[in-house]
Image (cartoon, rainbow, N blue to C red):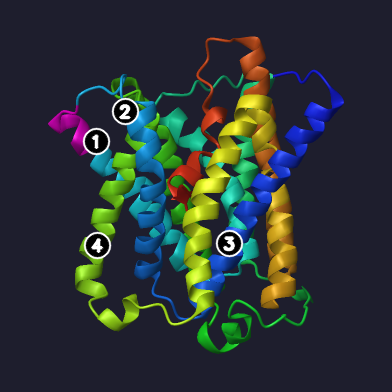
Amino acid sequence: MVMESAPEKLKLLLGVLALQCCLAGFHIVSRAALNMGISKIVFTVYRNCIALALLIPFAYFLEKKNRPPLTFSLLAQLFFLAFCGITCNQGFYLLGLHYLSPTYASAIQNTVPAITFALAASLRLEQVNINKRYGMAKVIGTVVSVGGATVITLYKGTPLMNFKSSHILGANTVSQNVVLNWSVGCLFLLGNCIAWSGWMVLQTPVLKKYPARLSMLALTLAFGLVQFLAIAAFWENDIGKWRLHSGEELFTILYAGLVASGVALSLQIWCIDRGGALFTAIFQPVQTVMVAIMAAVILGDLLYTGGIIGAVLIVIGLYLVLWGKNEEKKSNSNQPDLSRHLLSEESSRPTTVTSDVP
């Protein structure tokens, strides 16, 4: 969408930057929650409860007249979507974040557009035309993004810089509570990205049968919550772990539920409506820069050469995929445009709602 005036362009730019800042903050508070000893399952259950409570009124009233009837087949598909987009997505994210810096968690998540393209192409939901420049750009971008993630996973490198943490949000416990395992963390984060991408690809055919998007998201969140509660019945049955012991713990959960799921989702919808999905998506790497600064200052995280090299490759691959999608859209308006789904993770992680961004 072409903006009509400079003030409107500035408003859109500030909106996109605010969106990325909200999502960057989610990475920090999620890691802080782990540093403070909050259970991963407890964190996701409370977060999704808040997100679901926020979403249900909007889904009910805004889609009351155009919500199709539910069938057993549709419920089964929504249950599987929840397993992919909520349970696996958020679970792998927190498992990866346990072993890895939030900076590299954010960097690896920039592979989602490339992985989404690869999954969509394998399911024949996306056309691959290597005879065209845009087709080759998407393929090369996917390879470069995956290569960057591989570099981060296999090559840690030497530390570049370090800041003293400000000793807030549990930052002073990061060294004692978490023993970082670089490769394991990267593999979990790649699992998070694959689950996130799978959720975006698989929801497309579901939306054709059930076009009430907010209601679909609410049902997916509800099923995801049920799945996490089932896991909690076996792995987190100590009632003491469900109690919050400080204002900082409460803040991290409220931020994840209200800001990452509520404010960020609203900003995302507004930005895509005003500027388009592509314009919103190209600012994703800004989030990684924000996370790096916040993590260094607040949590005292280190930056490593391997992570920087991999992150640069991922961003290059991201822009190649987005450029290819944009050129393809110009060339043929009938081609499926997956770029509109690039940031839908906050509805799941976040989900992001997200998703977790995740």
Please identify the quarter of the rendering in which residue 155 is found.
bottom right
**Residue 77 image label:** 1
- Which numbered disc, 4 or 1, marks the residue that appears first in the sequence? 1
Residue at which label 2 appears: 206
- Which numbered disc, 4 or 3, marks the residue that appears first in the sequence? 3
Mark nearer the viewer, 2 or 4: 4
At horizontal 63% and vertical 53% (from top left) the residue drawn is 22
Percent from the top left, x then y, of residue 45? Answer: 34, 62
Q: Amino acid at mark 1?
A: Gln
Q: Are marks 2 and 1 in contact (CB under 8 Å)?
A: yes
- Rendered-image quadrant of the N terminus: top right
**Residue 27 image label:** 3
Percent from the top left, x then y, of residue 32? Answer: 56, 73
- Which numbered disc, 3 or 1, marks the residue that appears first in the sequence? 3
Q: Secondary structure at mark 1?
A: helix
- Residues in magenta, as a range: 70-76
Question: Few, some or many C-alpha atoms within 10 Å of disc 1 (few <14, some 14-19, many ≥20)?
Answer: some
